[in-house]
Image (tube, rainbow, N blue to C red):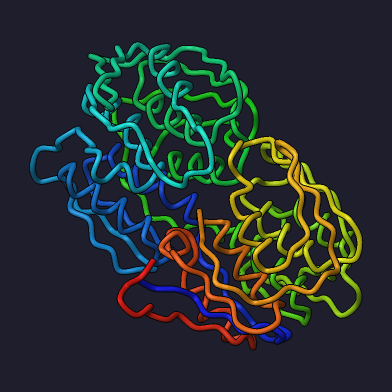
């Protein structure tokens, strides 16, 4: 089993290219099910989740070629099997995004309840209620969701709370429904807006994607698309936090600064210099790192996917910071691992209190989820001695060659194979 070995104490200097956004690419790949003709998606990151999604599409009967940064699907030549099995869906929560396209395009779908990172309960009840509002008959038994609909029909649906995948699933279902669908209290993340762009490229009529109200006028059929995925805001934010912790100056090539505003506000308060340079972003820290407080919230608030990375940075900041997690109840699983490295962190239910400024020491630590993996690497960049981050298969779900990118700007970091395959 692979691990990431980091030796701390190196300032970061140089350039890092930002990959395409995984959380945008995955729903777009699922949207290929809405057309029988071949599609082309560019700027796709080489990640395990991309391979998992391709494998799922192949199981469903689509011919998919993955040659990152490009993924193509061929024109459908045979029947599509509208069933997503547990063996594939358990690996990645985003697999549930085939549910909407399948029931819209083929009238039925059987999809396993999803898996993914163990960061808390993430029910799909909003997906199912929304599909029922569009006319689908839903049944949940033996760990599977079965949805059937002769024809979906437009309706108004109000989400009980904003949900990214729920919004995306209903968008993809509604583009082939009869009539007009109005979705209210939608997730406003940039990845939702990106899916709306692609659906419109396919000939759909989607208005308001990226806002709280989305209006969709259904069509009988959709065209294929050729599209380049937006840059990954979380990857860019992660490297910003790495520079903040380790110090130095790095140019993030193609970083989506506008999508990172809530993160950049906090980083600037902490003492980082963040500046747009054309299509790139220069981030640096040369002085003291100051503690800041953060409460996660749906976009345009501070993203939960950046909470762990900011916490690692706060471990070496001057002063006390308070981080409150409002999205997922189990998203402090990185805290015990940071504590093993000498971090002074106290948790109280959904709040973590970090007393920064104490030196971190390298240790053998265990990654518990995708963003926790990144936080441990950031801590390793400033820890005294060697840090070994285990279970980096989580990392490979969302970061493309992170050890090579950090190594290219001066970090002492490498991927290693543990003897005997010990976890």
Closer to us: 173 or 146: 146
Q: On screen, 133 above or below 93?
A: above
Q: Is residue 296 left or right of residue 267?
A: left
Closer to us: 364 or 381: 364
Q: On screen, 102 above or below 66?
A: above
Q: Residue at x 23, y 28 (%)?
A: 110
User: Would residue 333 be seen by someone viewing this image from the given angle?
Assistant: yes
Badge count: 0
Q: Residue at x 14, y 36 (%)?
A: 81
Give how far across and how far down residue 285 sits, in percent. Answer: 83, 76
Give how far across and how far down residue 46 sits, in percent. Answer: 39, 67
Give how far across and how far down residue 159 sits, in percent. Answer: 56, 20
Q: Residue 34's image quarter? A: top left
Image quarter where the N terminus lies is bottom left
Give how far across and how far down residue 297 sits, in percent. Answer: 71, 38
Image quarter where the C terminus lies is bottom left
Q: On screen, 273 above or below 233?
A: below
Q: Residue 152's image quarter? A: top left
User: Would residue 301 be seen by someone viewing this image from the given angle?
Assistant: no
Q: Is residue 297 left or right of residue 22?
A: right
Closer to us: 165 or 36: 165
Q: Residue furthest left?
A: 78
Q: Is residue 87 left or right of residue 408?
A: left
Q: Residue at x 55, y 31 (%)?
A: 163
Q: Residue 116's image quarter? A: top left
Closer to us: 152 or 52: 52
Q: On screen, 276 above or below 326?
A: below
């Amino acid at each position: 089993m692979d691990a990431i070995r980091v030796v701390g104490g190196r300032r970061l200097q140089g350039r890092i290219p930002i990959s395409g956004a995984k959380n945008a690419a995955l729903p777009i790949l699922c949207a290929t099910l809405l057309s029988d003709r071949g599609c082309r998606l560019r700027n796709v990151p080489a990640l395990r989740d991309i391979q998992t999604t391709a494998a799922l599409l192949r199981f469903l009967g689509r011919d998919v070629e993955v040659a990152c940064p490009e993924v193509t699907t061929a024109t459908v030549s045979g029947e599509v099997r509208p069933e997503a099995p547990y063996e594939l869906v358990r690996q990645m929560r985003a697999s549930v995004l085939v549910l909407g396209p399948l029931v819209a395009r083929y009238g039925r779908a059987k999809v396993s309840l999803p898996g993914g990172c163990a960061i808390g309960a993430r029910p799909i009840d909003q997906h199912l209620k929304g599909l029922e509002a569009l006319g689908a008959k839903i049944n949940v038994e033996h760990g599977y969701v079965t949805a059937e609909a002769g024809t979906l029909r437009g309706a108004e649906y109000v989400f009980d709370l904003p949900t990214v995948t729920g919004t995306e699933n209903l968008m993809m279902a509604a583009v082939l429904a009869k009539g007009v669908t109005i979705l209210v209290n939608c997730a406003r993340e940039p990845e939702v807006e990106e899916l709306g762009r692609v659906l419109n490229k396919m000939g759909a009529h989607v208005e308001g994607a990226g806002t709280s109200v989305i209006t969709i006028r259904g069509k009988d059929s959709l065209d294929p698309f050729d599209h380049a995925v937006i840059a990954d805001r979380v990857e860019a934010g992660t490297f910003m936090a790495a520079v903040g912790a380790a110090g130095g100056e790095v140019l993030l090539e193609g970083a989506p600064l506008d999508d990172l505003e809530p993160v950049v506000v906090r980083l600037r308060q902490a003492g980082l210099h963040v500046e747009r340079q054309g299509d790139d972003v220069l981030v640096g820290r040369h002085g003291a790192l100051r503690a800041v407080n953060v409460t996660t919230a749906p976009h345009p608030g501070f993203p939960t996917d950046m909470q762990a990375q900011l916490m690692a940075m706060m471990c070496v900041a001057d002063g006390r910071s308070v981080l409150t997690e409002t999205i997922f109840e189990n998203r402090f699983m990185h805290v015990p691992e940071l504590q093993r490295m000498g971090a002074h962190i106290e948790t109280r239910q959904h709040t973590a209190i970090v007393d920064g400024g104490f030196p971190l020491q390298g240790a053998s630590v265990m990654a518990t989820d995708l963003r926790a993996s990144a936080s441990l690497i950031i801590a390793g960049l400033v820890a005294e001695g060697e840090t070994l981050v285990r279970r980096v298969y989580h990392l490979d779900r969302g970061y493309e060659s992170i050890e090579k990118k950090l190594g290219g700007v001066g970090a002492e970091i490498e991927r290693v194979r543990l003897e005997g395959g010990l976890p």
